[in-house]
Amino acid sequence: MKMPEYFEYYLEKSICKKITPDVNRAEFLIQESEKNFRGLNKRILVMKGIDEDNVNSIIKDIYDIIMEMIRAKMLLDGYSCSGNFAHEAEVSYFKKLGFADKDIFFLNELRVSRNSITYYGRILTQEYAEKCYAFLKKIYPSLRISLDEDRI
């Protein structure tokens, strides 16, 4: 799997556009991601972990939490993406936030995996879901710091 293009590529192709920062919409996404993150943690705790019955829903939730945070940051920075390749463009914005290539690669893999669940009915493994959850727990604090810097 290849890495997404640089963010500027998506700007040039008009997949992403420069907009007036949308603080209200960003704040909504931040609150939703926080609530969803807490809910996911509770769900995994109550269910005593990830198993074959919750693998796909947990992977989709992880992807949604991360993307809500990235979209919030983009909105605060004055960017919005839509149309074909919008999710790929949002993943590419992850690099602008200072994350390592290995994290961008994993997030892009997660994007493709989530799409394989949603659009092609693929069942993923418990091991992969656990990797995704570990990834979320690793990057969540850094994403929060990035968002909090803009909210001060």
Image (cartoon, rainbow, N blue to C red):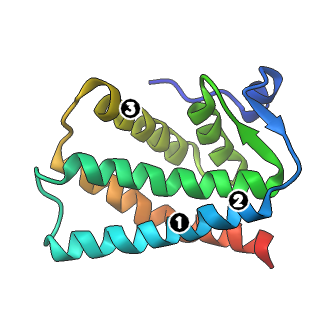
Total marks placed: 3
Q: Circle 2 sits in a helix, a strand or a loop, which is it?
A: helix
Task: Indicate whether 76 appears above or below 2.
Answer: below
User: In the image, what residue occupies the spot 72% across and 47% down?
Assistant: 96
The residue to which callout 2 is attached is 25
Residue 50, quarter of the rendered image: bottom left
- Kindly identify the amino acid type of the residue bearing the numbered disc 2: Arg
Q: Nearer the viewer, residue 120 or 5?
A: 120
User: In the image, what residue occupies the spot 42% across and 60% down?
Assistant: 136
Q: Rounded to the nearest whole Å, what is the CA distance between mark 2 and mark 3? A: 24 Å
Residue 150, quarter of the rendered image: bottom right
Tell me, for residue 32, which label it has, or none.
Answer: 1
Q: Circle 3 sits in a helix, a strand or a loop, which is it?
A: helix
- Kindly identify the amino acid type of the residue bearing the numbered disc 1: Glu
Q: Going from the N terminus, do you reach mark 2 or mark 3 first?
A: 2
The residue to which callout 3 is attached is 115
Question: Which quadrant, please, contains the N terminus?
Answer: top left
Q: Circle 1 sits in a helix, a strand or a loop, which is it?
A: helix
The reply to whether the C-beta atoms of the residues labelled 3 and 1 are less than 8 Å apart is: no
| Whole-percent x, y for residue 104 in the image | 54, 43
Q: In the picture provided, is 33 more to the left or to the right than 128?
A: right
